[in-house]
Image: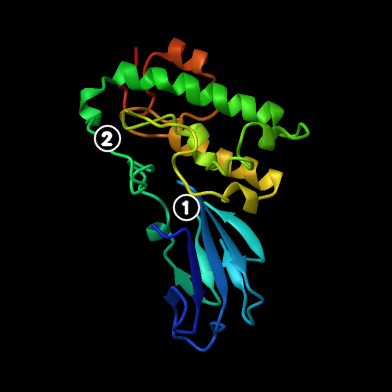
Amino acid sequence: MKKTISIGRNKSNDLSIGFQQVSGNHAIITLIAANSLIIEDLGSTNGTFVNGIQIKRKILNRKDRLKIANILVDTKPYFISNIFPHMGNGIENNISKEEISIPQQFEKLKEIWETYQSIKINHKKNGFWKNIGLTAAGMGIGALLVPFTGGISIMAGSLFGRGAAGLLKDDEKIQVVENEFKVNYTCPKCKVFLGYTPYEGLIKRKKCLTCKTDWV
């Protein structure tokens, strides 16, 4: 999958929008993580808007509404698959998620929670992002928070090409981490986000409040 998509009226763009209000080279979208894009306006005449607000640069998640001038653009095709976000990068898997029990899937939430908490606590420390390899090794941020998706263990850094993290400021990196956390810290059955309840609290709850599935 291509990591950068150019948008504009010119036919040379990856996404050509043939309306006069769209600038020739209007904006560019870059895939940062499985559930996060970054949109940058290229000095367009009529602006780029996210959820009705004009922006110059903005992290996008799957729920955001993007307008190029006054043209609504569907960003869904530019995210990596929500079910197996690591696929398309040459990684083979032969494990069906049906083979992994709900309790086994639930146990993986512990790793996601602990990783998220560790990043939140440490991200402002000098050199933190470089030390964990996001810049130095060009790892994709999403890899940190997708150790398990649909029953597949994923090696850190396997999701994306080099350089994605280097495009972001530290505050933008934590926003991407937040996006990835919200997509992956979910009920193994119904995939509803479990909020910011610690994993230990989920163990005590024992079941999903939405679909009533027993986790343990």
Disc 1: which residue = 63
One can see residue 176 in this view = yes
93 over 20 or under it: above or below: above
Disc 2: which residue = 93
Q: Position of residue 25 (x, y in %)?
A: 56, 79
Q: Position of residue 158 (x, y in %)?
A: 44, 39
Q: Residue at x 56, y 50 (%)?
A: 164
Q: Is residue 201 left or right of residue 81?
A: right
**SS of the residue under disc 1:** loop
Q: Residue at x 51, y 56 (%)?
A: 64
Q: Is residue 93 left or right of residue 174?
A: left
Q: Position of residue 4 (x, y in %)?
A: 49, 62
Disc 1 to disc 2, how far (Cα)? 28 Å
Mark 1 packing: few (<14 Cα in 10 Å), some, or many (20+)?
few
The answer to which quarter of the image holds residue 96 is: top left
**SS of the residue under disc 2:** loop
Mark 1 or mark 2: name the one nearer the start of the chain.
1
Q: Residue furthest right?
A: 126
Q: How many marks?
A: 2
The disc placed on residue 172 is none
Q: Residue at x 37, y 23 (%)?
A: 208
Foreground: 140 or 55?
140
Q: Residue furthest bottom?
A: 20
87 over 54 or under it: above or below: above
Q: Quadrant of the C terminus?
A: top left
One can see residue 193 in this view = no
Mark 1 or mark 2, whichever is nearer to me: 2
Mark 2 packing: few (<14 Cα in 10 Å), some, or many (20+)?
few
Which kind of residue does numbered mark 1 sit on?
A: Lys
Q: Quadrant of the N terminus?
A: bottom left
Circles 1, 2 touching at the beta carbon (< 8 Å): no
Which kind of residue does numbered mark 2 sit on?
A: Asn
